Amino acid sequence: MRIIFFIATLLMSSTTYAQLRCVDKLMPLPRPSSAHYLLSTEWTAGQTDVITDGDAARAMNSFVFGKLLCRTNEIEFATAPTCAQIDATIPDSLVCYANSNLGHFIISQDSGKNLHIVFHKVKRPRRHD
C-alpha cells in the first residue's frame, strides 16, 4: 500500500512542478539570485573542452525547457548567449552570459562539462500609485 501511495505522490508532485511558473522554479527562495547545476548528462556538450556560444544556447534550452519545464511563452531569450574569457592567461576562465525577459544567467563549465548557472532576477521598478 505504501508503494502505491509513494507512486501516486510522485506522479502528482511532478505534474504540480510542471504547473509552477518559470520564475518560481528559477527562484525557489525569495532572493535576488539563485544558483543551479546542470549535469553533463542533462545537456548535449560540444566537441571542444571549453564552452562556446552555441553550447551555451543549447545548455540554456536544456535547462529552462527540459529540466525546469518552463513554457515558451514564460521566458524569452532576445539575443543569443555570449561567452568570453575572463583572464587571458587562464584558458579555463570562460564564462557565458545569457539575457532573458525574466533576468540574466551567468554560465560556467567545470572539467566534467557540468554547468554552473546563476540566475539574477530582473529588478522591477516599484509602482507608485
Image (spheres, rainbow, N blue to C red):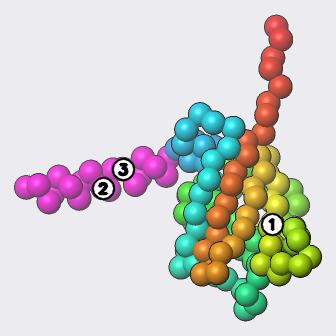
Crowding at dot 3, Cα within 10 Å, few <14 / some 14-19 / many 20+, comes out as few
Q: Position of residue 48 (x, y in %)?
A: 75, 90
Looking at the rendering, in which quadrant would you find the N terminus?
A: bottom left
Q: CA distance from mark 3 to mark 1?
A: 33 Å
| Extreme residue in the left direction | 1
Q: Tell me if mark 2 has few (under 14), some (14-19) or many (20+) residues whose alpha carbon lies within 10 angstroms of its own.
A: few
Look at the image and say whether residue 111 sits in the magenta stretch: no
- Residues drawn in magenta: 1-19
Image coords of residue 20 (percent x, y):
52, 44
Amino acid on which disc 1 is placed: Cys
Question: According to the image, label 1 marks what residue?
Answer: 96
Image point 73% across, 64% down: which residue? 107
Which callout, 1 or 2, points at the residue further toward the start of the chain?
2
Residue at image mark 2: 10
Q: Amino acid at mark 3?
A: Ser
Quick one: SS at disc 3?
helix
Q: Is residue 76 visible?
A: no
Residue 124, x across and y down, in percent:
79, 30
* Disc 3 target residue: 13
